[in-house]
Amino acid sequence: MIASAGVLASGPQPSQAALARVNLVPTLVATALLVTGAAVLADTVDHRQAALYVLGAALGLVLYHAAFGFTSAWRVFIADRRGAGLRAQMLMLAIATALFFPALAAGSLFGQPVSGFVSPLGPSVVVGAFLFGIGMQLGGGCASGTLYTAGGGSTRMLITLAAFIAGSAIGAAHFHWWVALPSLPPVSLVKLWGPWTALAAHLVVFAAIAVLTIVLERRRHGRLIAADEPPRRGLARFLRGPWPLVAGATALAILNFITLALAGRPWGITSAFALWGSKIAWTLGFDVASWPYWSSPANKAALESNVLADVTTVTDIGIITGALLAAGLAGRFAPVWRVPLRSALAAVVGGLLLGYGARLAYGCNIGAYFSGIASSSLHGWLWLVAAFAGNILGTRLRPLFDLAVERTPKLAGC
């Protein structure tokens, strides 16, 4: 099924002959969507929104070509102490914090006011991240993984995505109850310690986690797993993949920094799911506008405005488009429409947990973990601990749904 890093969530892996071909139809469709979408956004919203859509496509292409997953990277470490994916995440965070912390301390970037994702520490983060962690393993992906594998041709992940959106809307409806529970105020380590002390402390922790994965992997296996020989080199590899994890980690950190410069805040994903789900619920007759979640001026404006005016929405759609383009270029777009019943059930349960958990925890593996830590928010670290615990339980539950617990990373999905 879905592995540490890959692109197809179900179905057979493509043959060498298939790898040699570009899937022309999805490649042309994705290109047309990218060009047309950017033009429409520039005309109906503004050029910044168009740029964010293209940036989202770049994120989708990087995620797909680097097969940069969170879900199976954690799963193979939990199940078999293989830590390459975790080490790539630590590299990504190290680069991001080095870029973000000085800009956040200054409060502006290239003349644009910027701020990070800094949220309170309380039961909602712990419970939400734990539920999200379980959902990662049952749904078969994280927030970024759900988008890029769906765009890359995974039919199962379309089920997860639909349930993810529904769970996000339910989480928005319940959000006021959870945030009313006792909690600690938001803590920005950049504000508390200054950018350079905070950066040094973070780099030490990232290095310690990476070293720990090396020690545990060598203790279990005697050596670190060697990367497979790439099927392509040079420009062909750049355009069609697969990319090394290190390249993916570096590109994602830089693209998140560009997001900060364009949007004034870091990369996020799941607030758009809450918006989409709530708009659908509103259309079905639910009194969504009365939910406290949508009472703040910014949220109320988002609910009442055209969905394409939402920054997170356009980057999310861009991720799907970019992944479709990457899958076409790689010759790996091959949807399999038959999804086994137990697998589909896991996708529904996992998607609901992903959506609900992300709302409670102020974000997902991107908004709370990646961008939260890059924002120096202490809640990002709390999210990591609670979500990892949820992944441990979720990994144990996978066999109940006939989902594999692979022992080594492979090119297959988030």
Image (cartoon, rainbow, N blue to C red):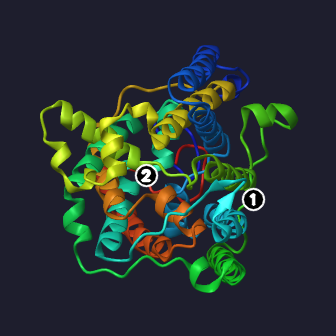
Helix, strand, or loop for circle 2?
loop
Is 181 on the left or on the right of 93, as rendered?
left
Question: In this view of the protein, which residue sits in the foreground, 86 or 325?
Answer: 325
Quarter occupied by residue 407: bottom right
Question: In this view of the protein, which residue sits in the foreground, 7 or 357?
Answer: 357
Mark 1 or 2, nearer chain start: 1
Q: Where is residue 400 in the image (x, y as percent from the top left)?
A: 29, 55
The correct choice, above or below, for 167 with respect to 334 in the image is below
Instruction: Give the residue number, with chain letter if any, for mark 1.
Output: 226
As drawn, the label of residue 404 is 2
Say which residue appears at 53% left-offset and 57% top-offset: 70
Distance from disc 1 to disc 2, alpha carbons, whole Å, reads 22 Å
Three-letter amino acid code at the position of disc 2: Ala
As drawn, the label of residue 304 is none
Whether residue 135 is visible to the viewer of this picture, yes or no, is yes
Helix, strand, or loop for circle 1?
loop
Whether residue 164 is visible to the viewer of this picture, yes or no, is no
Three-letter amino acid code at the position of disc 1: Ala
Mark 1 near mark 2, Cβ–Cβ under 8 Å? Answer: no
Question: In this view of the protein, which residue sits in the foreground, 34 or 196?
Answer: 196
The correct choice, above or below, for 265 with respect to 314 in the image is below
Q: Where is residue 141 in the image (x, y as percent from the top left)?
A: 45, 49
Q: Position of residue 377 (x, y in %)?
A: 51, 73
Quarter occupied by residue 360: bottom left
Report how many numbered discs are placed on residues in the image: 2
Say which residue appears at 46% left-offset and 48% top-offset: 269
Q: Position of residue 299 (x, y in %)?
A: 33, 49
Is 344 on the left or on the right of 57, as rendered?
left
